[in-house]
Amino acid sequence: MAAGPESGSEEWARHWRYADLPGLDLLRARYVRHAFPRHSHAEYVLASVTGGVEDVGLPGGTLHAGPGAVVLINPEVPHTARAGAPEGWAYATLYPSAQVIDAIAAETTSLRGSVGFAESSVLDPHAARLIGGVHRAAEEGNALAADTLLRVVVARLLSLYGGPLPARLPRSAGARAADRARAVLEDRMSGPPTLEELAAELGTSPFALLRAFKKQYGMPPHAWLTDARVRAARRMLDAGTTPARAAAEVGFTDQPHLNRHFTRIVGVPPGAYQRERAGTYKTGRDLTA
């Protein structure tokens, strides 16, 4: 599948960082057949849909976002994404860290502590244009404009749709078991136990653990582990580890296994992702590269 913003009908994607905007990842893409499985991000998601329709599956249901819409997803919220129309969808996405969001909130709003967004999708063409402007300025190497537009759009979104993240409720026995299961999976990522072994180790039953884990993290343990492996692989690729070594370290069977899951969750293959970190992105590179 050919890639590149100039292509009118094929899929393309660029997932990168701009050195002058620390704490921010950027994704600009057009997808037709690609579908993101259930996953979550450590960062916030601010996505401006520029064409077609994106269907985003969230815990509260599926939202349909078209041109002029901005999708807002708080950290660690499980979600899926796929085309909501035959022509697919195109979008420009910002992934600011909690530190970036909290700093802008402290400077421009009365919100303090961990903040988030009360709306998952808003029709805000002005904010959508600002998000596109951040991308254009970063791609042109205009650090002053990129930084300014980033702060303006985050401040706007926080003032209109922001609020404190919900306080965590007291932990139930099931939630505590889910947290302990997560810790075990993180610790033994390359050689995890079976569901039965994990439940026995935690003193519960497989189905009780499965229900508690899905309630706590929005996905079953095996899906959460795949997502966690991809996150770990991203950190290793950022540090310069080869995709083959990263695959082995995080527990994937081989590099093609990493390639498949990484591309499904991140939106670009690990090789293309790492080339961006090294500053060697080539416009028009294929999504399968």
Image (cartoon, rainbow, N blue to C red):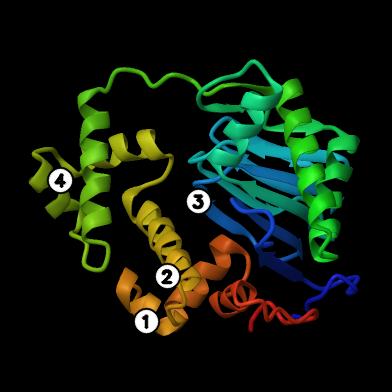
* Residue 86 shows in this picture: no
Q: Please tell me which of labels 2 and 4 falls first in the chain.
A: 4
Give how far across and how far down residue 11 sits, in percent: 77, 71
Query: In x, y percent, where is residue 28?
Result: 75, 60
Gap in Å between the C-alphas at discs 4 and 1? 30 Å
The kind of residue on which mark 4 rests is: Ala
- Disc 2 from disc 1: Cα separation: 9 Å
Query: Seen in the image, is 193 located left or right of residue 261?
Result: left
| Residue matched to label 1 | 245
Identify the residue at image location x=64%, y=73%.
276
| Sequence order check, earlier mark of 4 and 1 | 4
**Where 5 falls versus 244 (above or below)?**
above
The residue mark sitting in front, 1 or 3, is 1
SS at badge 1 = helix
Is disc 2 in contact with disc 3, using a CB cutoff of under 8 Å? no
Q: Are marks 1 and 3 in contact (CB under 8 Å)?
A: no
User: Circle 4 sits in a helix, a strand or a loop, which is it?
Assistant: helix
Residue bearing mark 4: 199
Which residue corresponds to mark 2? 236
**Quarter of the image with the C terminus in it:** bottom right
Crowding around mark 1 (Cα neighbors within 10 Å: few <14, some 14 to 19, many 20+) is some
Q: Earlier in the sequence, mark 1 or mark 3?
A: 3
In the visual, does 150 lie left or right of 24? Answer: right
Q: Which of marks 4 and 1 is in front?
A: 1
As drawn, the label of residue 39 is 3
Q: What residue type is labelled 1?
A: Arg
Q: Do the residues labelled 2 and 1 touch (CB within 8 Å)?
A: yes
